[in-house]
Amino acid sequence: MSIPTELINRYPWLPSLKKHYSEIASRSPSMFISEVFSKDFGSDLKERLLDLFEAAFDNLEEISDYKSDRLNVYVYLLLNIFLYALDNQMITNRLANLYSKITYNELIKENNDANLYNICQDLGLKIRYYEPPINYGVNIVKDHHQKLETNFTIHFIDYLSLASNLRDEYRKLAHNSLLEGYVFIQNKRLIRLIQEYVRNKLLIKEAEDKESLKAFLKEVSDIKDFKEILEKVLNTWTERKEEFEYTFKINFESETELLTLFPPCVNEILKKTQEGQNLIHNERLFIVWFLLALEYPVEKVVDLFSTLPDFNREKTTYQVNYAKKKNYIPYKCLTLKSLNLCLAVKYKDELCLTGYGSVEPSERKKIAHPLFYTRIKKYRASRDENYKKKELAKENE
């Protein structure tokens, strides 16, 4: 089957990329990098790549000015090369998540059954298309009957293969309608499966052959634009690494006065949940990501939302498990301020307002992330506790 080049330009992860851009496949990575950055669009390419990394580091769901033109092919190929060169699983995960979400949004906005069918065909999926849509069941919610219909069915083997990493209950084969070995699937759910395929395409594992990686980096070290992008990404990562790596753990069973370790932005949301107040979307995301980052048990995070008016245990459990699997990083302080979730001034929190470190005000470091606030509080609590133990030991001598 022949797939339009224009579709490859928008979705370069398709297998037919090799057919439409066979001249690229014949080049070595270093030759490809050198040639592509020497073209007129080299600076535009550099900007798009840096925007992707910046958006991934900011934990964004999309890029507002994302373009699906021919340059998208080069962006995708270079992104794979950069992820290999960076050799960092945390960065890879974030980029794979972002890029797959961009793909999902683009396919949803496109709303084109013919293109969706062609994409599935190119992926080698056994898919059937129905026009007009076929009815396959009825959904009953509070005595309201809604007919279920779709244009697509997918063979159960392909369905299971694509959905294997998606753990939510409603995706299990037993919970879906089948006919002659084909699963009835609505457009959005089919696109969600394609999103997972794209995410897995970018999940490059850390290089086992470090010598080959070193040889590659040496080979491309003289390519100015490639080197600049790599260094900029690494420098940004080094500066912000503290936001993404939190190795300390909190014992939620035995930790005393747990709320004293949390910043006011967290305690405010916890207070609202205790009072049964509804939370806005960003508050929900933030508290889930924050508690999961501290390895708070999933079931307890779910229970936290049980007091809210719109609580649905099955749906909430799925969403919290999904967030845990994706390993999302909570909003940083700058983001919390932009979302009006920072409450440092309202609570007159000394650590938030004055920072930490030197006694000299001009030399004090500002808190950049709520998880770092908790780390400092935990360290100070442990330090004070050890000091008390030593003093008590002296008194008992």
Image (cartoon, rainbow, N blue to C red):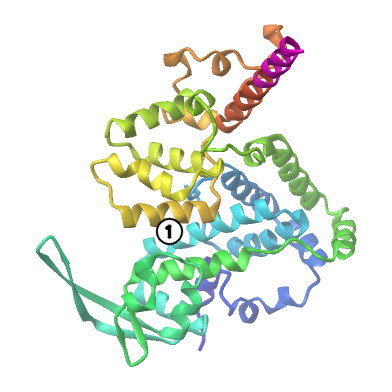
Image spot of residue 311 (x, y percent): 27, 47
Residue depicted at x 58% and y 62% = 72
Q: In terms of image quadrants, where is residue 209? A: bottom right
Q: Quadrant of residue 236?
A: top right
**Residue 355, image x, y percentages:** 62, 17
Going by the numbered disc 1, the residue's amino acid type is Asn
Quadrant of the drawing holding the C terminus: top right
Q: Is residue 86 left or right of residue 292?
A: right
Local crowd at mark 1 within 10 Å, few (<14), some, or many (≥20)?
A: some
Residue furthest to the top in view is 360
The number of callouts visible is 1
Which of the two residues, 312 or 81, is positioned nearer the viewer here?
Answer: 312
Residue 42: image location, x then y, percent = 70, 54
386 in magenta: yes
Label 1 sits on residue: 105
Q: Bounds of the magenta span?
A: 385-397
> Measuring 54% from the left and 62% from the top, which residue is drawn there?
69
Most foreground residue, 131 or 167: 167
> x, y percentage for residue 193?
45, 70
**Label 1 SS:** helix
Question: In percent of the image, x 58 and y 37: which residue is there?
Answer: 250
Q: Is residue 347 magenta?
A: no
